[in-house]
Amino acid sequence: MEREAWMEKAVQLALENVLQSRGGPFGAIVVKEGRIVGAGSNEVTTKNDPTAHAEVQAIREACRQLGTFQLSDCELYTSCEPCPMCLGAIYWARPKAVYFACTKQDAAKIGFDDQFIYEQIGIPYEERTIPFIQLQPESFRKPFEAWAQSPSKVEY
């Protein structure tokens, strides 16, 4: 199947999501070797889950289907340029390519503006809209030390 056809499937997921009142106008699919291994649409409001974005949903399903946490031999097709959260998930999943249709500017025009998140990342913790406050109990490094010593760790 051609890339345009895969993108059309992602766009159709987004459209169906809106028409069926399941959430925002976003859809995504993960493709491996010519077949869809994961699909998702935005279900933030229906699942009451702020992480239920189309890309995250598709990545989760693909990882379950393939039994892996890395999608390095897969491609992601999404109806819109990923937000910062989805961008992070995509980089952790490591697909070989990401294809998108609408831009983040297109999304901002209809009320999905995530520019403030990009801006917050560069602001010192204590000056962010939501303050980030570091607390370090006596044992705060123990989980990292245990990981460094663990013979069963799986690096990623």
Image (tube, rainbow, N blue to C red):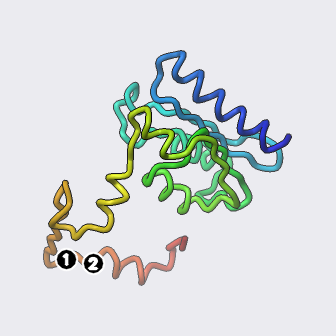
Q: Can you tell which mark lies on residue 139?
A: 1
**Horizontal side, residue 12 vs residue 91: left or right:** right
Q: Position of residue 37 (x, y in %)?
A: 70, 42
Q: Amino acid at mark 2?
A: Lys
Camera-side residue: 130 or 51?
130
Q: Mark 2, residues whose alpha carbon is within 10 Å: few (<14), some, or many (≥20)?
A: few
Label 1 with label 2: CB-CB less than 8 Å = yes
Q: Quadrant of the C terminus?
A: bottom right
Q: Quadrant of the N terminus?
A: top right
Vertical order, 92 against 7 (above or below): below
Q: Position of residue 62 (x, y in %)?
A: 63, 46
Q: Residue at x 66, y 27 (%)?
A: 12
Q: Position of residue 83 (x, y in %)?
A: 46, 49
Q: Residue at x 66, y 35 (%)?
A: 10
Tell me how far mark 1 sits from mark 2, CA to CA.
5 Å
Residue that numbered label 2 is attached to:
142
Query: Image quarter for residue 112?
Result: top left
Camera-side residue: 116 or 39?
116
Label 1, secondary structure: give it: loop
Label 2, secondary structure: give it: helix
